[in-house]
Amino acid sequence: MSLFDKPAHVLHDMLQKKEISSVELTEDVLARIDAVEPEIGAYLTLTKDAALAQAEAADKKIAAGGDIAFLEGIPGAIKDNICTKGVKTTCASKILDNFVPPYDATVMTKVKAESPVLLGKTNLDEFAMGGSTENSAYHVTHNPWNTKCVPGGSSGGSAAAVASGTAIWALGTDTGGSIRQPSSFCGVVGLKPTYGRVSRYGIVAYASSLDQVGPIARDVTDAANVLNVISGLDEMDSTSSPAPVPDFTKALREDVKGLKIGLPKEYFTDGMDPEVEKAVKDAIEQYRSMGAEIIEISLPHTKYAISTYYLIAPAEAATNLQRYDGVSYGARVDGADLVEMMTNTRTEKFGEEVKRRIMIGNYALSAGYYDAYYLKALKVRTLIQQDYTEAFQKVDVIMCPTAPTPAFEIGSIISDPLQMYLQDICTVPLNLAGLPGLSLPCGRSSKGLPIGLQIIGKALDEETILRAAYTYEQSQNYHNEMAKLGGEQA
Ligand code: GLN
């Protein structure tokens, strides 16, 4: 019996009943890694020996009896922009190729308190800037459903690992879609929590007013359970929310009767792949047949979301990335004096997309342009937030596609940054508004690629999103299907 293809909650029950051991489970996942990781490339660092030692330790704890924690003994993977004490954290950048954090991010402290098995660190676009993992300074990750295609990004490694069975669960980060879009492309469930729900302490900052950590999982139940583990106020992150954290698994009920679902007309326009549009509309019809009420809404400022995001995110990134100067962190390239050393380090060690964002960001923040670009973007951000506030007076959740297309081919749009940015149209607006959003599989394209439905909720109302997602998931079979890899193809 294979174990790598099962969700964490099933494996948790098997471990609790002592039907399997964590060592057996971990060995099964490590064998899967040996078999398929060469064609997927989800990981930047593998910590196999530590994983087996953690599995042995978990088995000892389990043998001692009592209830086990949700993640106890279950192998997972961590995006490589989340600080892990003693394990390299590169952000897929050459500038951090030797950076070993001396501390854990708060999410890691919380995860480790559950005694999980940690398999390693997953690939991403450099500093989480991108939507395909093609901006990784190390290698491209391949989509398990079609290895010629990207897995999405920037958390492409985490999504590809969960989708290919080389991790049971994973953590990603989402600044403008980086949990949801790769989850959509890889046919798994990804949840970006409300801004502030999860501590950002120890997450390498990209755009601090937008970044959030969240789960990438096999199904909605696993996503809810992992969210339980990582949520909550943290005194190390002044933007984390003091709001009480509910038990998110209580939201896992099949019940959408009377649920008011808003369909924003601005999301179903030209440029949307017809197969994506059909799959999403079919899912909405399914909700209607299960008793939900469908209401057309308008989010009129959606058309400004990409321009607003691509000013605010680079502006914050330009500021956050000033710290990589060859002095405090990571790599150094020598020069005749301090300025030349810093210039050489940043010129050689940052990739092209990161440099592009630093230039856009510094331009938007510079004297004379600040009011015209950055300040204007902040004002439009408020208008985008107000669109949602008004919409949520009429509806409980908003549904739309996660991405305008299924996964695209590696190399097909990487040389056209604007086209790559436009891919983010469905995901960036809710980061600007700080709202939670989830992507779950709702179809397959004619080429067999997954399509994702995005469910957006009110601030701090992840529960309604999870209930809506769970109800739909139970009416489908996508969460039980895995990509065929490693010679399994018919
Ligand atoms: N694709 C978006 C960007 O490049 C989002 C990335 C993210 O969420 N980290 O900025």
Image (cartoon, rainbow, N blue to C red):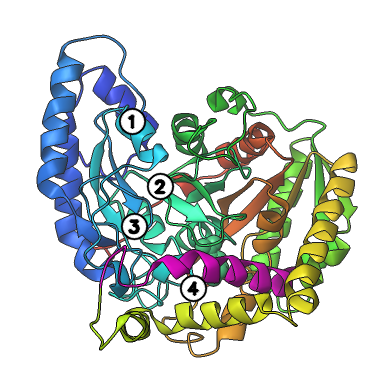
Quarter of the picture holding the C terminus: bottom left
Which amino acid, by three-letter code, is at mark 3?
Asp
Which amino acid, by three-letter code, is at mark 1?
Leu
Q: Which of marks 4 and 3 is nearer the N terminus?
A: 3
Q: Which residue was labeled with disc 4?
A: 447
Q: Residues within 10 Å of mark 2 (few under 14, many from 20)?
A: some
Q: Which residue was labeled with disc 2?
A: 202
Q: How crowded is mark 4: few (under 14 residues within 10 Å), some or many (20 or more)?
A: few
**Which of the two discs, 3 and 1, sits closer to the camera?**
3
Q: Which residue was labeled with disc 3?
A: 80
Q: Which of marks 1 and 2 is nearer the N terminus?
A: 1
Residue 151 in sight here = no
Quarter of the picture holding the N terminus: top left
Specify the quarter for ligand 1: bottom right
Decide: marks 2, 3 in contact (CB < 8 A)?
no
Q: Give 296 or 377, whichever is nearer the viewer.
A: 377
Which amino acid, by three-letter code, is at mark 2?
Gly
Tell me the residue at 49%/47% (across/down): 213
Q: Which of marks 3 and 1 is nearer the N terminus?
A: 1
Which disc number belongs to residue 299?
none
Q: Report how far apart the C-alphas of labels 4 and 1 lie in the structure.
A: 35 Å
Element under label 3?
loop
Which disc number belongs to residue 71?
1
